[in-house]
Amino acid sequence: MSNFLKPILYFFPLLILQLTVIPLISIFGVGPNLIIITAIYYALHGGQIYGMMLGFLFGFFFDLLSGGVLGASMLSMTIAVFIAGYFYNENRVDNNTASYFFLVILFIAAFINSLIYSFAGNFNPEVRFSALLLEGALLPACYTTVIGLAVVAFKMRNGRL
C-alpha cells in the first residue's frame, strides 16, 4: 500500500509547483511537466498497469485543479505512461531510472503527452499542425527532459527516491 501512496504524496506538492512556479520559469509559454516525470519514474518502478493508474489519477487531478479541458490531461498522461511502461523490466529498474536511458524514455513519453494534450486541448482551427507539433509537443518535451536530468543526477548520487 505504501508503494501506491508514496507517488500520490509526491504528486500534490508537484501539482502546486506545476501550477504556480512552472509558469514563472516557462520560456515563451513553454514549460516542463513535473507530473509526467513523476508518473514515468514510478511506471518504470512498478510496471505498465501501475503506471497507467498513476497517469490516470495524476491527469484527472491535474485537470480538476488546473481548470483545463476536463479529460485532456487524463487521456494524454494515461497514453504516455502506457507507452513508457513498455520499457519496464523488473530486472533493470535501477538501470532504467538511474541512467541516461531514463531521459530517452522521458522524452518519448513527454512528447506523446504534450502532443495528445495539445490536440485535445486546442480548439482553434487556425493553428497550424507544424506550430502545434513544435510549440505544443517538441519544445515542452525537450524542456521536461532537461528537468529530468535532475532526477537522473539525484538518483545516480543517492539511490532510490
Image (spheres, rainbow, N blue to C red):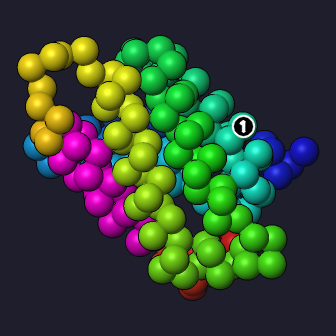
When the figure is inspected, residue 65 is found, relative to residue 7, above or below; the finding is above
Q: Position of residue 68 (x, y in %)?
A: 38, 18
| Left or right: 49, with 52 as reference point | right
Magenta residues (range): 132-151
- For label 1, the crowd category at 10 Å Cα-Cα, with few meaning under 14, some 14 to 19 and many 20 or more, is some
Q: Secondary structure at mark 1?
A: helix
Question: Type of residue at label 1?
Answer: Met
Which residue is drawn at the image coordinates 36% and 41% (left, top)? 114
Examine the residues drawn in magenta and state their main secondary structure.
Answer: helix
Q: Is residue 14 in view?
A: no
* In the image, farthest residue toward the bottom: 157
Q: Is residue 124 in view?
A: yes
Snapshot quadrant of residue 17: top left
| Left or right: 77, with 112 as reference point | right
When the figure is inspected, residue 117 is found, relative to residue 99, above or below; the finding is above
Which residue is drawn at the image coordinates 40% and 35% (left, top)? 116
Which residue is drawn at the image coordinates 51% and 77% (left, top)? 101
Between residue 117 and residue 37, name the one nearer to us: 117
Residue where numbered disc 1 is placed: 53
Snapshot quadrant of residue 122: top left
